[in-house]
């Protein structure tokens, strides 16, 4: 079983996330009751995405 370790995002991590941006129409602010999750690029293939964003999804391909 794999687990995800989390820590409260520091100011530098939040700044980096704000540089990357968010979906159009959404703020890049991170409220106190939310967090930033950092994933290795090779894990993106397992995150479900709308069909319009290309292949992958949670199929592991």
Image (tube, rainbow, N blue to C red):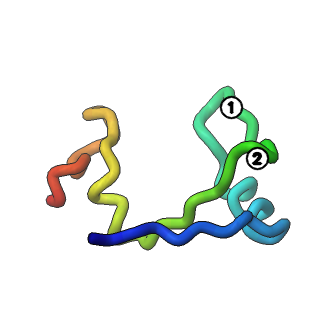
Q: Secondary structure at mark 1?
A: loop
Q: Is residue 45 visible?
A: yes
Q: Is residue 39 above or below residue 32?
A: below
The residue labelled by disc 1 is: 26
What is the quadrant of the C terminus in the image? bottom left
Question: Which residue in the rendered view is the most extreme toward the right?
Answer: 11
Picture coordinates of residue 3, whole percent (x, y): 40, 69
Q: Is residue 29 visible?
A: no
Q: Which mark is residue 30?
A: 2
Residue 31 figure quarter: top right
What is the quadrant of the N terminus in the image? bottom left
Q: Residue at x 67, y 53 (%)?
A: 35
Q: Residue at x 64, y 57 (%)?
A: 36
Picture coordinates of residue 11, whole percent (x, y): 84, 66
Give the distance between the C-alpha atoms of the residues marked 1 and 2, in whole angstroms.
11 Å
Q: Secondary structure at mark 2?
A: loop
Question: Which residue in the rendered view is the most extreme toward the top?
Answer: 25
> Crowding near pointer 1: few (<14 within 10 Å), some, many (20+)?
few
Q: Which mark is residue 6?
A: none
């Amino acid at each position: 079983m794999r687990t995800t370790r989390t820590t409260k995002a520091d100011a530098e991590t939040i700044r980096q996330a704000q540089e990357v941006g968010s979906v159009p129409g959404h703020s890049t602010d991170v409220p106190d009751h939310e967090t930033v999750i950092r994933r290795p690029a090779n894990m993106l293939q397992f995150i479900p995405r709308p069909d319009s964003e290309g292949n992958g999804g949670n199929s592991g391909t």
